[in-house]
């Protein structure tokens, strides 16, 4: 005979919070992962049908950050001076399902951040989630949706947004792009302050190493778009890949590794370790995570 599943009693106030969040998810069109299935990785050398600007000045950011940019067909006078000078500062390369972006957006509400993802379905999921979060937090900010101020799942993770977060996710977006080929098409020299490479494809076979996201050639492009003092964040659960990335970054004259002591005071590091789907999977499997962060130098040291 099979055992009956034990029912877990949920307090009435918590049940009300969960139901309110589910209703809000439905109204805002919050996407569900099971409808966005795709392979874990994509070949960066394939001839993907990608759209990209011929130069950063040709990029229309208004479709990504409507709060901060007037459309290209709108008069320049309609944008404030702060809008005219606003630029993307954080780039998550191979952002996956957007966990890091969603975690950082409320921490840096006035900093524009962009996820770059080559897979079609994954990019669409992140775009749909950002759209839903913007709708949700606009409603929360207006007080149009009364949500009880409590909610936590059995594993302690928050279930609902108790109040509108700073920025309302207006500062985050995603674009389908191949950063290995077209990064300078999107960003000007010294534009970015942070670049993230979180759990990239390890490309285990030696003949595939040329497809790794960190290489001497690509580091030159990352150094070009990263401002002096900016930081490159790398993390992986594959030790061999970690050593590969460290070897190439150590050898590049415009990057210097940041000490563990200094990283301890960086609020971003915790999100780098824990906010992505891959990072959570590694934690569930009790695997190791190898972190290495580098600062962009003003001039070569060697």
Image (cartoon, rainbow, N blue to C red):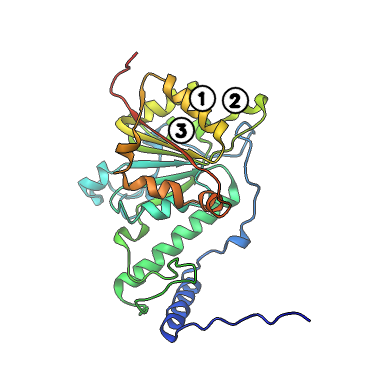
Q: Which of marks 2 and 3 is nearer the N terminus?
A: 3
Q: Is mark 1 on a helix, strand or loop?
A: loop
Find residue 290 and report its horizontal and vertical position in percent: 48, 38
**Residue extending farthest right:** 1
Using a 10 Å C-alpha cutoff, classify the residue at mark 1 as few (fewer than 14 neighbours), some (14 to 19) or many (20 or more). Answer: some
Residue of label 1? 215
The quadrant of the rendering that contains the N terminus is bottom right
Q: What whole-number distance in Å separates the C-alpha atoms at marks 1 and 2? A: 8 Å
Looking at the image, is 102 positioned above or below residue 160?
above
Residue of label 2? 210
Q: In which quarter of the image is residue 67?
A: bottom left
Find residue 147 and report its horizontal and vertical position in percent: 37, 78
Q: Which of marks 1 and 2 is nearer the N terminus?
A: 2
Q: What element carries label 2?
A: helix
Residue of label 3? 183
Looking at the image, is 206 positioned above or below residue 15?
above
Q: Which residue is drawn at 53% across and 48% down?
A: 96
Q: Nearer the viewer, mark 2 or mark 3?
A: 2
């Amino acid at each position: 005979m099979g055992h009956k599943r034990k029912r877990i009693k949920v307090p009435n106030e918590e049940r009300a919070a969960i139901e309110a969040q589910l209703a809000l998810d439905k109204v805002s069109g919050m996407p569900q992962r099971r409808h966005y299935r795709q392979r874990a990785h994509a070949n960066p050398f394939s001839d993907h049908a990608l759209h990209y600007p011929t130069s950063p000045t040709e990029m229309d950011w208004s479709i990504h950050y409507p709060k901060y940019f007037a459309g290209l067909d709108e008069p320049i006078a309609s944008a404030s001076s702060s809008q005219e000078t606003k630029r993307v500062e954080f780039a998550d390369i191979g952002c996956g399902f957007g966990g890091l972006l969603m975690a950082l957006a409320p921490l840096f509400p006035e900093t524009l951040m962009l996820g770059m993802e080559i897979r079609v379905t994954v990019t669409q999921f992140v775009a749909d989630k950002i759209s839903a979060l913007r709708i949700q937090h606009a409603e929360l900010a207006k007080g149009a949706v009364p949500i009880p101020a409590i909610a936590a799942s059995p594993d302690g993770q928050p279930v609902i947004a108790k109040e509108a977060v700073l920025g309302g996710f207006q500062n985050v977006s995603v674009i389908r792009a191949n950063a290995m080929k077209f990064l300078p098409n999107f960003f000007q020299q010294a534009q970015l302050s942070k670049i993230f490479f979180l759990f990239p494809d390890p490309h285990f076979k030696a003949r595939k190493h040329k497809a790794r996201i960190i290489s001497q050639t690509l580091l030159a492009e990352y150094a070009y778009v990263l401002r002096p003092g900016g930081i490159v964040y790398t993390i992986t659960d594959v030790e061999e890949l970690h050593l590969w990335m460290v070897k190439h970054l150590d050898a590049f004259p415009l990057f210097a590794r940041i000490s563990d002591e200094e990283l301890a005071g960086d609020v971003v590091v915790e999100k780098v370790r824990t906010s992505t789907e891959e990072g959570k999977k590694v934690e569930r499997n009790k695997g190791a995570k190898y972190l290495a962060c580098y600062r962009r130098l003003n001039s070569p040291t060697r």
